[in-house]
Image (spheres, rainbow, N blue to C red):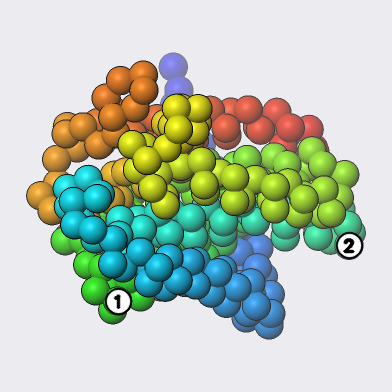
Amino acid sequence: MTSPTASIALQQQQSGAFAELSQETWALTRRLFLQLMRRPSTLIAGILQPLIWLILFGALFANAPEGLLPGGMSYGRFLGAGVIVFTAFSGALNAGLPVMFDREFGFLNRLLVAPLRSRSSIVLASVIYITALSLLQSLVIMGTAAVLGYGWPGVSGLVLVLVTLLLLVFAVTALSLGLAFALPGHIELIAVIFVANLPLLFASTALAPLTFMPTWLGWLAALNPLTFAIEPIRAAYQGPLDLSAVLLEAPYGDVTGTTCLLILLLLTIGLFLVIRPLLNRKLS
């Protein structure tokens, strides 16, 4: 039976460990934001690319016939959800680059020999930094879409958008961090980013509904994680929020909003569990 004194000592030890972990994570996160302030090109490029897509594609299909898209929505509003998700996805896919550069320049080795309370702070700092950056970029795109007349979700819709983006960003950040430790250098990581970016965008419902696609592409889009993030956000813009409604008529069956969020949650948990042994080995 544990004595009160031992229980208090254990609580104080746990509280001290949490405080030290928070301090280390904050210091490493602050370093990443200082780097961003000194070289803001990453933030600017992450906003400009999807912004160009939103403006050009929205203008290109501005005169599309009514009734062409599901629910009779305009193409600009249809495209907006896809561009918001693409912005968050692109930002999260770059999560491994700061870690990769720290590896190559030797800073990561200095961290590994430093008296850190927990080396998990290295990963936590990267996750916090990329999450904040991706959400900031996505909110700028949402604001621009609203200015262009493509609408703005209500309070409940905005909560759904943020939850969906968080799940997607966490999942892709986990994948990118795993690649940063698994690949030999930044050239290989950048190659993976370039190869994965556009194919995943086009093989989703970001630019066109499933009904517009050939059968093989429809199957790919219906299995693409980006599609499971796009459809709930698109529903948040359409009107009354109902997660039990069918959002995706996939070739394998109907998919509701709740199912989309559940798939993203399982994907996030699965990816973090997959990369955890790799991170433990590389950070030990």
Q: Label 2 amino acid?
A: Phe
Position of residue 250 in the picture relative to residue 204 (left or right): left
Q: Quadrant of residue 271?
A: top right
Position of residue 249 in the picture relative to residue 265 (left or right): left
* Residue at screen point 28% across, 67% down: 63
Position of residue 203 in the picture relative to residue 188 (left or right): left
Q: Secondary structure at mark 1?
A: loop
Front residue (pair 217, 267): 217
Front residue (pair 202, 85): 202
Find disc 2 in the rendering and name its residue.
105
Q: For the residue carrying disc 1, how many other residues have a C-alpha within 10 Å: few (<14), some (14-19), or many (20+)?
A: some
Residue 185 bears which disc, if any? none
Point out residue 106 in the picture as x, y percentages from the top left corner.
89, 59
Distance CA(mark 2)–CA(mark 1): 43 Å
* Residue at screen point 31% across, 68% down: 62
* Residue at screen point 78% across, 33% down: 281
The reply to whether residue 213 is in sight is yes
Q: Label 1 amino acid?
A: Leu
Point out residue 79 in the picture as x, y percentages from the top left corner.
36, 58
Query: N-terminal of the two: label 2 or label 1?
Result: 2
143 w.r.t. 196: above or below: below
Point out residue 283 in the picture as x, y percentages from the top left corner.
77, 41
- The quadrant the N terminus occupies is top left
Give the mark count.
Answer: 2
Point out residue 17 in the picture as x, y percentages from the top left corner.
57, 47
Find disc 1 in the rendering and name its residue.
148
- The quadrant the C terminus occupies is top right
